[in-house]
């Protein structure tokens, strides 16, 4: 989580204030967020399932991206009181509302042959 007094945070606030496009794009910045949304569009997933679906992502980065997505209202997180803990992630209503746009981006990339093999 960013410090509210950091220059990066203050610059981000200046850039996103008053501009719907930059505000929206700020939600999806992060190397793995769109990929995570694509995976969660398939349904509720546990942390381990997401990790297996995206083998190139580190545990630390997966945790960080999911926390940011939860903070921004794109993902809901449910923790079940079990041993070991069971945690499930689901796209929120806001996250689901972006799926048609994500599908359009996917189709556009396919049409323009912009896909590359995943590193990992």
Image: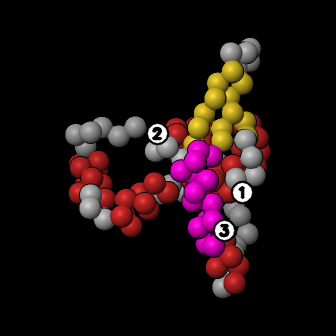
- Distance CA(mark 3)–CA(mark 2): 23 Å
Q: Is residue 67 magenta?
A: no
- Residue 88, x across and y down, in percent: 69, 33
> Which numbered mark, 1 or 2, is in the foreground of this view?
2
Q: Earlier in the sequence, mark 3 or mark 2?
A: 2
Q: Quadrant of residue 20?
A: bottom left
**Residue that badge 2 annotates:** 71
Query: Is residue 94 positioned above or below 60 on the image?
Result: below
**Residue that badge 3 annotates:** 103
Q: Secondary structure at mark 3?
A: helix
The boundaries of the magenta stretch are: 91-105
Q: Earlier in the sequence, mark 1 or mark 2?
A: 2
Q: Residues within 10 Å of mark 3 (few under 14, many from 20)?
A: few
Report the side of 89 relative to 60 (left or right).
right
- Residue 89, x across and y down, in percent: 66, 38
Query: Is residue 68 positioned above or below 103 on the image?
Result: above
Q: Which image quarter holds the N terminus? A: top left
């Amino acid at each position: 989580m960013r410090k509210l007094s950091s220059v990066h945070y203050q610059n981000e606030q200046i850039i996103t204030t008053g501009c719907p496009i930059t505000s929206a794009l700020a939600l999806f910045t992060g190397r793995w967020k769109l990929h995570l949304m694509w995976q969660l569009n398939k349904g509720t997933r546990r942390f381990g399932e997401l990790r297996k679906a995206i083998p190139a992502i580190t545990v630390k980065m997966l945790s960080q991206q999911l926390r940011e997505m939860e903070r921004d209202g794109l993902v809901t997180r449910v923790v079940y009181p079990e041993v070991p803990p069971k945690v499930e992630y689901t796209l929120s209503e806001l996250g689901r509302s972006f799926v048609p746009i994500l599908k359009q981006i996917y189709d556009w990339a396919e049409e323009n042959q912009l896909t590359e093999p995943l590193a990992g």
